Image (spheres, coloured by chain):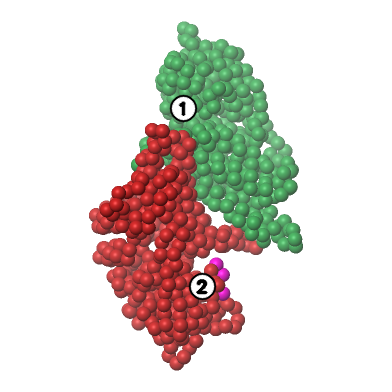
Chain colours: A green, B red
Amino acid sequence: MDFILNEEQTLLRDMAARFAADARARQEKTPEAPDRRWSRFAELGLLGLTLSEAHGGLGGGGVETMIVAEEMGRQLLTDPFVPTVAVAGPLIAALGEATQQAQLLPALAAGDLVVVPAFLEPEARYDLAQVATTARAEGERVVISGRKAVVLNAPEADLLLVSARASGAHGDPEGLCLYLVPTRTPGVVLRAITTLDGRPAAELTLNAVTVEATARLGPAGAALPAMEQAVDRGVAALTGEAVGAMAALFDLTAEYLRTRKQFGAPIGKFQALQHKLVDMKVALELARSVAAAAAMAVDVADAEVRRRFIAAAKVQVARSGRFIGQAAIQLHGAMGMTDEYGAGRYLKRLVVIGALHGDLAHHLERFAASTEPAGPRH
Amino acid sequence: MKFAFSPELEAFRQDVRRFVADTLSPATRAKVDEGRRLVKSDYVDWYRILHAKGWITPGWPVEHGGTDWSPLERYIFEEETALGGAPPVTGGINMIGPVLIAFGTPEQKAAYLPAMRRGDLWWAQGFSEPGAGSDLASLATRAVLDGDHYVVNGTKIWQTQAAYADMMFALVRTRFEGKPQEGITLLLLDMNSPGLSIQPIRTIDGGQELYQCFFDNVRVPVENRVGADGKGWTYAKYLLGFERHGIAGIGHAKRQMARIKRVAAAEHDRGTRLIDLPRWRDRIALLEIELMALECLSLRLIQESEAKGAGAGPGVEASILKIRGTELRQDMFELLTELTGPYGIPFDEEVMRDGWGNGAPVGPAHAATIASNYLDSRKISIYGGANEIQRNVLAKAILGV
């Protein structure tokens, strides 16, 4: 395993860091409309990061996605980078027919088309196979009915990637299809909500939404493996995003300990606080390291290895994120409780990431299920 | 960034793995596997095997018998030897060895280095004293010059396996004014010197590996001083900064993880293996994830320091590896004691040395050594700089206060 960024990756990181810092500064001064912000991502090529050059992309993989996501987390940006670039784009590239790819991917890379996945349902927690939404064929058309839970960035999306059951029983891994559903289709009802960390999202209801049969992405009834892989990409990207937020919060806290004075000295002189800060550092570096390994594992062919690393990274990030977020508030004292100071914004981002695409319990279960008694060598 | 190791590194790993599997004494490996106590021959026999292969002192300069491996190769070597059940290379090889190479006289190098590499010379460490632990610079063992000898009086403590030692390297005070660090000198003492005696200390695990050493007018020739009088503190810091690639103990941790899984698969509750019960399985999985994260961190820090050209391995970040590596292994031993249940209670010191011998085993074989191993593991967050000291060091580096 090689943890050192190559030259191109270093350039990407520097560029993404500048871009994200600018984006945050601009947003805090005079907020821009989401589509204006999004087109700035496109201008730098960040939206085609994971797409092939033939589709206007840069041909990057898990590592490149992580690099950008980390900078977004550091600056607490709310744009749909992970849903669109980490999850939806690669999924369309993997499953789409040539015409679908040609139609959708260049537009996605150009920032003209925001596509977000709508996989999970109100009763399903994080199980992608628990799909009660149905897809019923009616001649050349398909009628989709059901509900989808907490669809991130849906209010900004042009197109929803909806999982629906064409056959099989509830929870059956077989029988799932993916459909490309424009958000303006009659019967699509979005109840817009804002997440804890300020992202737009929606509860989605599909009331007999009728699409052409050609709106199906990939083979009929066999969408699950590709969905799982796409979500793994999303998880890896989210762990990178979390590392960015943790790193920024750690720096903020260390600076506070250097400058805040009590009892006639910077509070960083006191061992009780020093040791807490060191434990934050340990938690950060562990999370950073395993998140990087997960980003590298995204593009590994062996699905078992991929699953283990990505599940491990999500568990570690959930634990490190809670610990760092909470310790940062504590070390800031009452100042940490104020909305204005901003430490809480990082904690909220970390809590949300912990609950996205599978929480600690979900990924611990995935990891443990892949654990053999003898212990695979890795 | 790339997931796979290079084919060369992967081949190197396989070479080391095969070498350990082919050459390590099965009796020694069994002791390590079962958590029983090793004796001197377990160590020295292995050192001789390593010496014959040219692998006893990978970290030393090539002209003194080093291997010229990259930091990553050295890390993999340490991991694979530990994983394969080999005893750790100790007895001063990676402590006083590099100091002699850097600061010793040609005579000292000739007298000690080849013998150390052959496994013929074992060193005890004489640093801590009853009144000087974490505050090492407050050490009070005194050495007064008398002609061409130093006369040493005082005591050293917490010396591992001092009874195996032929020689001791010791920090002594030769000056009593000025800053405490400035009056310290590094001496090499023959363990057979008149006036030098050792006394074993029984530890909470039932073991007797630690010693206290007493000096009663012990005469040490001036030529046994390393470097300059009063510069011992500098050499000690050099010594403690050496060989930190493997400080997280990944190979040992992986062995313990495999042991946890073996035990959890052998122990049953109402007919179900513990490893299949979510309450246990989750705890095992959490430790395994922590181990993966720590392994990734170890690799990352080595590669980052290599990329920066630091050469000497991780710097202050090594304290992160020490803290997490020790606390993780302690958590593993804690879980092992819980997994054994009621058969973690009986304890027979004989089992730690020789196994059950002729008597019928009490409880499952895997349970007999776990309580002692657990108690022994409490030391790892204390020795080599207590974890609280490591946290102080890190905080200072982070905050600059």
Depth order, front residue of A51/B368? B368
Q: Residue at x 67, y 46 (%)?
A: A329
Q: Chain of mark 2?
A: B
- Give the CA separation, mark 2 to mark 1: 62 Å
Vertically, is B242 above or below B233?
A: above
Q: Residue at x 72, y 56 (%)?
A: A260
Q: Amino acid at mark 1?
A: Met
Residue beneath disc 2: B129
Q: Position of residue A219 (x, y in %)?
A: 41, 20
Q: Residue at x 30, y 62 (%)?
A: B42
Numbered mark located on residue A227 in the image: 1
Residue extending furthest toward the front: B359
Numbered mark located on residue A8 in the image: none
| Residue A326 visible in the current orientation | yes
Q: Is residue B135 magenta?
A: yes
Q: Position of residue A161 (x, y in %)?
A: 52, 23
Q: How many discs mark residues in the rendered view?
A: 2
Q: Residue at x 38, y 82 (%)?
A: B193
Q: Secondary structure at mark 1?
A: helix
Vertically, is A56 above or below B358?
A: above
| Quadrant of the image occupied by residue A320 | top right
Label pair 2/1, CB-CB below 8 angstroms = no
* Foreground label between 2 and 1: 2
Q: Amino acid at mark 2?
A: Glu
**Which residues make up the magenta segment?**
B134-138
Depth order, front residue of A173/B87? B87
Density class for disc 2 (Cα within 10 Å; few <14, some 14-19, many ≥20) is many
Q: Position of residue B309 (x, y in %)?
A: 45, 61
In the figure, is residue A335 to the left or right of B53? right
- In the rendered image, which quarter contains the C terminus of chain A? top left
Density class for disc 1 (Cα within 10 Å; few <14, some 14-19, many ≥20) is many
Q: Position of residue A99 (x, y in %)?
A: 45, 22
